[in-house]
Amino acid sequence: MTETAVTAESATPSVPAFEAVNLTRSYRLDGVSVDALRGVTLTIDQGEFVAIVGPSGSGKSTLMHLLGCLDRPTSGSLRVGGVDVATLDDSGLAELRNRTIGFVFQSFHLLARTAAIDNVALPLVYRGVSRSRRRALARAALEAVGLGHRLDHRPSQMSGGEQQRVAIARALVGDPQVVLADEPTGNLDTRNGEEVMAILERLNSERGVAVVLVTHEAEVADRARRQIHVRDGLVEADVRADG
Ligand code: ADP
Ligand code: MG
C-alpha cells in the first residue's frame, strides 16, 4: 500500500463532492422488501455545510451510508468526488472512502479501551502510513479538537463530549474532503453539542471541508447553509439559507 495523501488543494473545486441521480436502496428482510430510498437526486458541492433532516425512518442514515461508500445503491447512480461508485470493486470503494470521507456517528464508535491517539491513528494504518507519522498526525488532529492533553486517555475514561471530539479527530486525520456526521450531537448535552458544532463549523470555514450532518434538532439544522428534507425515502425540500 502506498500513502495517498489527498489534500484539499488537490481536490478539483469544479467536481461536486457528491452527485446522486435517482438513487434507491431497498433492504430485503425475510422476504419482505423495505424501500428505504426511492429515488434521490441531489448534488453537494465541495465545501458545503448541509443538514439532512426528516422524521425517523425516512432514510437519512441509509443516504449517509451510500454517500459515505459504506453501502451501495440498489439502483441509480452516485459519483463521489467525480468517481462513479458502480465502477469500483469493494476494495476500490473502501479506498475511495478512506481517502475522501471522514465519519462521525451518534454513538462515537471508538475502541473503548484503546488510547485516544491510537483510535485516531487507526484510519492511517490502512493507508500504509508509518507509525511515527501516524502518531504525529493523530496528535495534531487531537490538538485541533482541543484534546492535546488527552492523548493517552481511553474513551472509557472520557465524557461523551470528549469522546465525540476524539471521533471527529479520527474523521479528520486522513485530511478528508468531506465529513459525514449522523446525529453527531444526538447523545450530547447542550454544551457539548455546541462544542461539537463549533468544531465542525471551524473545519468547514477554515479548511474548506464539506460537512454533511443528519440531525433532528432544529437549532443544529439552522446552523447549516443548506437543509435537505427527507421524507419516505425522497427529498421533499432542498432549502438554502440566504446570504
Ligand atoms: P433514518 O436514519 O431516517 O431514521 P434509516 O435510513 O435508518 O432512517 O431507515 C430507513 C428505512 O429503512 C426504515 O424503514 C428502516 O427500518 C429501514 N432499514 C434501515 N436499515 C435497514 C437494514 N439494514 N435492514 C432492513 N431495513 C433497514
Ligand atoms: Mg438514522
Image: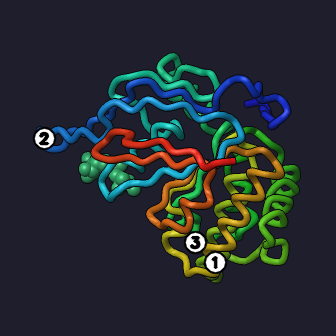
Circle 1: residue type:
Asn
Residue 212, horizontal then vertical, whole percent: 58, 48
Say which element carries label 1: helix
Tell me what residue is drawn at x 88 percent, y 53 percent. 132
Task: Give the number of the disc on residue 10.
Answer: none
Which numbered disc, 1 or 2, marks the residue closer to the eye?
1
Left or right? Give the position of 235 relative to 50.
left
In 3D space, how far apart are the residues under numbered discs 1 and 3 (Cα atoms)?
19 Å
Query: Which residue lies under the disc numbered 2?
Result: 32
Query: Viewer-proximal residue, 37 or 100?
Result: 37
Query: Which residue lies under the disc numbered 3?
Result: 112
Residue 147, horizontal then vertical, whole percent: 79, 72
Query: Viewer-proximal residue, 221 or 111?
Result: 221
Q: Earlier in the sequence, mark 1 or mark 3?
A: 3
Query: Are dots 1 and 2 in contact, CB under 8 Å?
Result: no
Query: Viewer-proximal residue, 103 or 115?
Result: 103
Tell me what residue is drawn at x 76 percent, y 28 percent. 13
Say which element carries label 2: strand
Tell me what residue is drawn at x 55 percent, y 53 percent. 213
In 3D space, how far apart are the residues under numbered discs 3 and 2 (Cα atoms)?
36 Å
In 3D space, how far apart are the residues under numbered discs 1 and 2 (Cα atoms)?
40 Å
Which quadrant holds residue 208? top right
Identify the image's colour scheme: rainbow, by chain, secondary structure or one colour: rainbow
Q: Earlier in the sequence, mark 1 or mark 2?
A: 2
Query: Which residue lies under the disc numbered 1?
Result: 192
